[in-house]
Amino acid sequence: MLPTMDSLDDDAGLMLRYKAGDAAAFSALYAEYKGPLYRYLLRHVHNAGAAFLVISMVTLLRALWPAPAIGMVPLHRADSSR
């Protein structure tokens, strides 16, 4: 199922909120995309444990470092001058 424009707009808003430090925004994104991400990883690594581990590590990193601290690229542009 392809995402609708409304869901893409919602996702962009959630990413902006997450970048601003809103943990609930990350939780919403995680809830929506953990299944599709797991299936994508499973197709590529052919190992359920490894796919689960990657998703777990992303969640752990999110808990340890808020979005701005892990170098998220701004959604509106990629600034290569830094």
Image (cartoon, grey):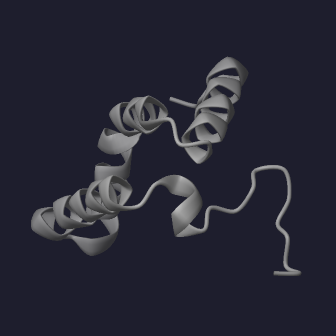
Which of the 4 image quarters holds residue 62?
A: bottom left
Tell me if 45 is positioned left or right of 49 in this view.
right
Q: Position of residue 76 (x, y in %)?
A: 84, 50
Looking at the rendered image, the quarter that the C terminus falls into is bottom right
Corner quadrant of residue 72: bottom right
Q: Residue furthest left?
A: 49
Residue 2 lies, with reference to residue 49, above or below; the image says above
Q: Is residue 79 left or right of residue 8?
A: right
Q: Report x, y in % for residue 61.
A: 34, 63
Q: Is residue 41 left or right of residue 28?
A: left
Q: Is residue 77 placed above or below 30 in the rendered structure?
A: below
Q: Nearer the viewer, residue 31 or 40?
A: 31
Identified at 72% across, 23% down, the residue is 5
Please report the residue visible at 27 percent of the width from the left and 57 percent of the height from the top.
55
Q: Hey, which residue is sitting farthest top in the picture?
A: 6
Given residues 51 and 11, the one toward you in this image is 11
What residue is rendered at 29% in x and 54% in y? 59
Which of 19 and 57 lies nearest the eye of the viewer?
Answer: 19
Q: How many marks?
A: 0
Give the x, y percent position of residue 64.
32, 60
Residue at 42%, 37% (x, y): give it.
Answer: 23
